[in-house]
Amino acid sequence: MDGLFFVLDKLGGPRLLDIRPSQGKYEAVFALRRGSLALRAFGAEGADTVEVSQLGSCEPRVKLFNLAAVDEYELVFRDGSRDGEVREYRLSGLQLEPESLVEVTFLGNDGGVRVDSPLGTTFFDLELRREASGVAVAVTRPDVFAAAGHTVTVTPDDWSRLEQTSIEMVGTPLSPLAIESYVGELYEPSEGPVGPDFDAAGNIGAARAERPLTTRATTPTRSCRASWRRRRKGTPPTSCIASCAATSTSRWR
C-alpha cells in the first residue's frame, strides 16, 4: 500500500520528515489519539520536507517548506474528541511559493485554524464540516489568504449551528522575532558555526543583520490567485496586488 504511516510516540515532539512523491503526488496520514491528520500534495517535482508536532495534543501543527515546488497541498484535520461528534477542517488548494514556509495550527477548544505565512502570501479554500447523529453539515469559504509576514485565524462562531453561523477571520502581523525564527528554520547555516553567508559579509563584527526584517501587507484579488495557479510557480503578479491594513477582521455568513 502506498503512503506514509507515522507511529506516535509518548514524547510527541516535532518530527522532520522527508517524503518522496509517486507520480508527482503523495499522501501522509497521521493517526491521532482521537482523530486523524492527512496531508496530500499534488504536482511535486521531488522530495519534500514536512514537520509535524504536538500530534498527541488537541493542537496538532504542520510546517510546510515546499522544497518540491508542489502545486497544491491539502490538509484535513478530523477531531473526534467529542462523544458522538466529529469536526473537520479541510484546507484545500493550499498554495505557497517554492522553498517557502507555512505553519498550520489546529487550535483546541474550538479555537479554529491558524495559518502563519512569514515569507510569502498563502492561499487556500477552507471547508468546515460537522458530523453528528448520522447527519453531516458543511460550510465552505473559498479564497482565504494569509499575506506575507502575517498570520490568519479562521473560526466559526457556533459549531452546533454550523449552517447558520458566522465565520470570523482575523489577520495580524507576525512579530519581527517570529519572522526571523521562521527564516532561520528555512535557511539554516550550511557550513561552520554560522554558515558561508556570514563569512562573506562585510561587517564581520556583527552577528546579526543590521537591517530589520520588513514585510508589506497585500490583498491578492481572485484573478490574482487564478493567475498564480496558471503560472504554477513564483509570487503573485504585482499588477494583481493591492495594499491592505496591517490588522483586519472579517466575518462571513
Image (cartoon, rainbow, N blue to C red):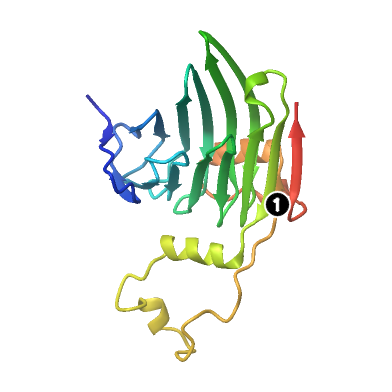
Q: Position of residue 195 (x, y in %)?
A: 35, 76
Quarter residue 167 falls in:
top right
Q: Position of residue 87 (x, y in %)?
A: 52, 24
**Residue placed farthest to the left in the image?**
1
Q: Position of residue 57 (x, y in %)?
A: 42, 41
Q: Could you tell me which quadrant the N terminus lies in? A: top left
**Residue placed farthest to the bottom in the image?**
205
Height in image: 253 above or below 98? above
Q: Is residue 75 left or right of residue 20?
A: right
Say which of 19 and 78 sits in front. Answer: 78
Q: Could you tell me which quadrant the C terminus lies in? A: top right
Within 10 angstroms of label 1, few (less than 14), some, or many (20 or more) residues? many
**Residue placed farthest to the front in the image?**
83
Circle 1 — which element? strand
Q: Is residue 218 left or right of residue 54?
A: right
**Residue that numbered label 1 is attached to:** 218
Label 1 is placed on what type of residue?
Thr
Q: Is residue 5 left or right of residue 154?
A: left
Total residue callouts = 1
Q: Position of residue 56 (x, y in %)?
A: 37, 40
Residue at image location 38% in from the left, 84% down from the top: 199
Say which of 136 and 229 sits in front. Answer: 136
Residue at image location 65% in from the left, 29% down from the top: 141
